[in-house]
Structure formats: C-alpha cells, structure tokens
Amino acid sequence: MPASLLSSAKGAFSAALYSALLLSACSATPAAEETSKDAAHKPAAARRAVSPATPATLPTRTLRITNDTLAGDPFGQELTVKQLVAAGARVAARKPFQNRHVPGQTDTIVVLRHQGNIFAFYRTPEKDLLQDASVTNFQPAYGQRLKRRLQKAHRASRQSIDKVRIGDTERANYVSVTFQQGRLSAVHVEPYVD
C-alpha cells in the first residue's frame, strides 16, 4: 500500500488514540470553576480565596537517540494478534482495509486491549504487522521485555529527562518513552508499515 495512505491512516489512529488517553486522564471540575462574570462581582479578597494557586511547571526535557535495534524491535520479538489474544487480550475494534498492493484483497486493522495496553495491527493473510502500540502496564511478559530493552534509555534519563525519543537511522520507526520522577511510565511504539 502507498506509504502516504498508510501514514495518514496511522496518523489518524495515533491522534485518536492519544485523544482518548488524554481525555480519560483529564477530569474537569466545572462546579469549582467560576465564570469571569461571577468572579467580577465578588470582592477581591473572595476572588483570591477561590483562585487556585498554579504551580510553576518545568518545560518537558526530551532526549533524542538513534538506535536501530531498539526502534526496529523494541519488544525483542515480533508480537502477533494470536499471541496477545492467547495472553488474554481482547479485540476492541476490527476494520476492513483494502490492500493497495494486491487487487481484490481486503486486509484488517485490529485493535487489541490487554491489561491497559493498546495495540493496533495491520493484519494480512500472511502476517500481523504491528502498526501502533501504547504500553503503560509493564507486568505482562512483553512489557517486561520492553522494559529490559529500554534500560539504557531509562538510565540516561534518571531525574533529568522527561521523555526519550528513539528512532532508527532511516527515521521510519520510533519509540517514545515517558518518565515520571525518573521512573518509566509509558511507551509509545510507532513502527513503519508499508
């Protein structure tokens, strides 16, 4: 399939995935918020008492690394839909996708959820191609392998780096690693799929 078509489909999936994760992580408290009109009618002392103090936020510090092995194979072995389902993953979505290279062949994009982790595969009759993965739970075997393989990036980031972006030489495969207080908290795997 043309790289531009898959890239746009992959980009749309990634954007939707990140939006869903961000929305689930955010919780608004509209009852505690005031409109500017309501606040203007209160005395200055009352407005100060209601206004929450905003902590100073530090800029995100990102380290970029080129490592063909980690970017190309972060899990240490190729994951498949069959393996993940056997480990307890459930199919969250299935979408037919017309194969542009093989006339008349319809492939499938399969989204799996497993213990809080999300995987998207481009599934052909011959092979499952990992298209996107978001891992926040490192307890499953694949999470343990991923964590071990990322130890080098983890050591480099201890308390001074918030994110590590690992790419390959061709800039096709990426692994984005997020740390909170020096501890690995999330990994987003973006392999190139043609």
Image: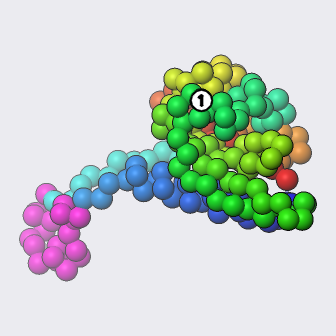
Quarter of image, res 184: top right
Examine the rendering and report whether any part of residue 54 can be seen: yes
Residue at image point 73% right, 50% down: 122
Q: Please tell me which residue lies in front, 128 or 23.
A: 128
Residue at image point 74% right, 25% down: 76
Q: Is residue 55 magenta?
A: no
Measuring from the top left, give residue 96's x and y in whole percent: 69, 61
Measuring from the top left, give residue 165's x and y in whole percent: 69, 40
Measuring from the top left, give residue 59's x and y in whole percent: 53, 47
Q: Amino acid at mark 1?
A: Ala
Q: Is residue 40 magenta?
A: yes
Q: Residues within 10 Å of mark 1 (few under 14, many from 20)?
A: few
Examine the rendering and report whether any part of residue 176 can be seen: no
Left or right, residue 54 beside residue 135: left
The residue singled out by tag 1 in the image is: 86
Up/down of 102 relative to 111, above or below: below
Q: How is the image coloured?
A: rainbow
Up/down of 57 relative to 28, above or below: above
Magenta stretch?
30-49
Residue at image point 82% right, 29% down: 69
Residue at image point 52% right, 31% down: 88
Quarter of image, res 179: top right
Left or right, residue 84 beside residue 97: left
Up/down of 72 relative to 5, above or below: above
Number of marks present in the image shown: 1
Q: Please tell me which residue lies in front, 71 or 20.
A: 20
Left or right, residue 64 beside residue 104: left
Measuring from the top left, give residue 12's x and y in whole percent: 65, 63
Q: Secondary structure at mark 1?
A: helix
Q: Quadrant of the N terminus?
A: bottom right
